[in-house]
Amino acid sequence: MKFFLDTAEISEIKALADTGLVDGVTTNPSLIAKSGRNILDVVCEICDLIPGPVSAEVAATDFETMLEEGRKLAALRPNVAVKVPLTPDGLRACKVLSDEGRLVNVTLCFSANQAILAAKAGAAFVSPFVGRLDDIGQDGMQLISDIVEIFAQYPDFTTDVLVASVRSPMHVTDAARLGAHVVTMPPAILRQMYNHPLTDKGLAAFIADWAKTGQSIL
Ligand code: E4P
């Protein structure tokens, strides 16, 4: 299972890259806006920090301009994954860009049928948004379960299920249980995954007992 960070904040990516657990990064127009940076600069910087796929989203909604933007983003670094929205034009652009050998991440997926379309369009990744489905009273993880089950029927589908809109560490556990290929999460969620009160309590006791021995390993 791969872990991507869902952020455009360079300081956060740098800090967590040191864990050795970050396999890629996803950005979107809202995250770029929040960073206050130029998209081309920030994507290049992220790509230089993280060797895995770095998703950079097109801003256009029409096929021709999406293609032009996608090619420009892909030319920045070899590890750019061009993110396109799950629309008829987006999937058309996905097919062309994928046929050109570029990584494409189809975003804003909210149904199993949309995921099937993305796979048929040759996407490297499809991003179902679990948190936003939960927000409207639907079961985001049921969608992941459906997509994973469907993709398993078709060995010719090479699209990875990239669980997005992750809001809690439980989303990560559930995605792993279902066999999703990738989870993209805000930095805070990756940090929370380390935590357990019994780990803290146990470590405090070990430190205190060790001090009593007066020993040193080094
Ligand atoms: C995925 O690639 C998106 O950037 C992201 O996961 C959206 O999450 P949100 O619903 O928390 O905005």
Image (spheres, grey):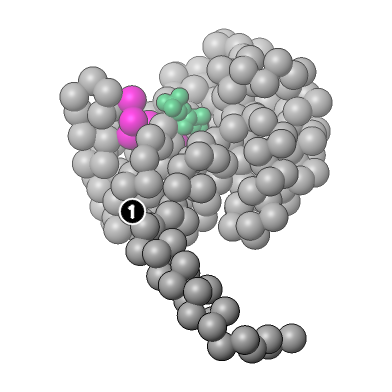
Q: Which residue is drawn at 40% across and 37% down?
A: 166
Residue 131 is inside the magenta segment: yes
The image shows residue 61 at horizontal and vertical percentages of 55, 11
- Rendered view: 140 above or below 200: above
The image shows residue 152 at horizontal and vertical percentages of 32, 57
Q: Which residue is drawn at 69% across and 55% down?
A: 18
Callout 1 crowding tier (Cα within 10 Å): few <14, some 14–19, many ≥20 = few
Whether residue 162 is visible to the viewer of this picture, yes or no, is no
The image shows residue 38 at horizontal and vertical percentages of 76, 18
Residue 152 lies left or right of residue 36; in this view the side is: left
Range drawn in magenta:
125-132
Residue that carries the numbered disc 1 in the rendered image: 173
The image shows residue 108 at horizontal and vertical percentages of 42, 25
Choose between 60 and 177: the one closer to the eye: 177
Q: Report the number of discs.
A: 1
**Mark 1, secondary structure of its residue:** helix
Q: Quadrant for the C terminus, please.
A: bottom right
The answer to whether the residue bearing label 1 lies less than 8 angstroms from the nearest atom of ligand 1 is: no
| Amino acid, disc 1 | Thr
- Rendered view: 153 above or below 67: below
